[in-house]
Image: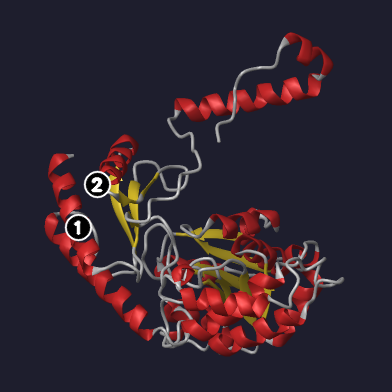
Amino acid sequence: MTVTTELPSTKTRSRQPGWAALQQIVAKQMARIDRQGRRRELPKTPPQNSIDLTHNDYLGLRQRNDLQAKTREAIASLPMGSGGSRLLGGNHPVFNALEADFSKLKGVAASLYFPSGYTANEAICRALINPAVAVFCDELNHASIMDGIRLARVSPERKTLFPHNDMDALEVGLAKSQAKLNLVMTESVFSMDGDFAPLEKLKQLCDRYQGILIVDEAHGLGVYGPQGEGCLGDADVDPNEVISINPCGKGLGASGAFVSGPEWLIEYLINTARGFIYTTAPSPWLAAGLLQTLDMVATMAAERAWLKHITTDVRTRLHKIGYKVSTSGSHILPLVIGDESQALAFESKLKEQGIFCKAVRPPTVPAGTSRLRLSLHAGLSQSEIDQLIYSLERLYHEL
């Protein structure tokens, strides 16, 4: 969809001066975006026979016919819409069952289901942050965490953006903090750099300096942990001693998000989290589908093992070609190109060869770090991996 920057006719402007003023403001902002070469458009869905590295359905659950069949059966007796906020008439029994099952998978006391990961992060920040709390946030955390902190109106002296995964810098800040409570916020797998947070070290610092660790498992849930419970399942960290945000739109192939923690915290969120209280509950159909998904994810060790294998394979082979990629890391693989136009050229050339991956540019990533974001998933075959490597090797020498 393209936003028009043409101004209304004189006749229209005289009748609707407010609309004319608004369109002038929008046209000015869109012109600025165009000068930067950063106008975005909604992409078309890649063809079925293409190699699609644009999505985050890491286990391929959207394409599972058995999951689709079980979901259709599960929703047969449920309404599509919830009918209201869960504090009004929208608290269907399927939500309670879903939260109980997810808590069991995660190994925690309780969970609360939110409409999206963005809403969950925003809600947890606004509910927990107050003048007695200091916030320490990794500088590469997702926009939803950053926006949640801003909406919580944290004073500058109570907010620290520490250098990415820098435990020494974080400890210096925590040691200086005079706050009654320190909240340390991180992602378990960072969405643009594809590296892992040092969860055990973060937890140790929180224990030492009166802190609580809050972990966003958006890109870890489903993929890591013995049963797909996320990176906390692989770390020597008690999931009941952290607060976790667990979005369902990636490894679980759906949408929504769980906030998991002690029962008293969930009760508090039910009473204070604006993103939970003042919104219509998600569709019961979605909740019923997620119940089927949770049963399936716990049994998908083979898919997780294959994804781990191809991740190591791709990283190792690209490193040998000359790309600046680590041979260890997650299934999210950034090829940092640097220049925006060059990154777009890589995207276009790969598309010509039936390989779809997105060039990620500022403001999503810092200036000078434009990149191709390869989102590896368990649905890729070895022949598709070989084709990807062949194409990237050619482009490395051509561009």
The residues tagged by marks 2 and 1 sit, at their Cα atoms, a distance apart of: 9 Å
> In the image, what residue type sits under mark 2?
Gln
Question: Hey, which quadrant is residue 280 in on the image?
Answer: bottom right
| Residue receiving disc 2 | 353
Q: Secondary structure at mark 1?
A: helix
| Residue receiving disc 1 | 387
Q: Which image quarter holds the C terminus?
A: top left
The answer to whether residue 291 is visible is yes
Query: Residue at 62% of width from left, 79% of height from top?
Result: 73
Percent across and percent down for residue 21 are: 73, 21
Q: Residues within 10 Å of mark 1 (few under 14, many from 20)?
A: some
Vertical position of residue 19 compared to residue 70: above or below? above
Vertical position of residue 119 compared to residue 107: above or below? above
Query: Residue at 71% of width from left, 79% of height from top?
Result: 95
So how many labels did they put on this image?
2
Could you tell me if the residues under marks 2 and 1 are in contact, i.e. CB atoms within 8 Å? yes
Is 81 displayed left or right of 27 in the figure? right
Q: Nearer the viewer, residue 179 or 356?
A: 356
**Circle nearer the N terminus (2, 1):** 2
Percent across and percent down for residue 238 are: 52, 89
* Residue farthest toward the right in the current orientation of the protein: 88
Vertical position of residue 324 compared to residue 115: above or below? above
Percent across and percent down for residue 169 are: 43, 65
Q: Secondary structure at mark 2?
A: loop
Vertical position of residue 182 compared to residue 394: above or below? below
Query: Residue at 47% of width from left, 43% of height from top?
Result: 363
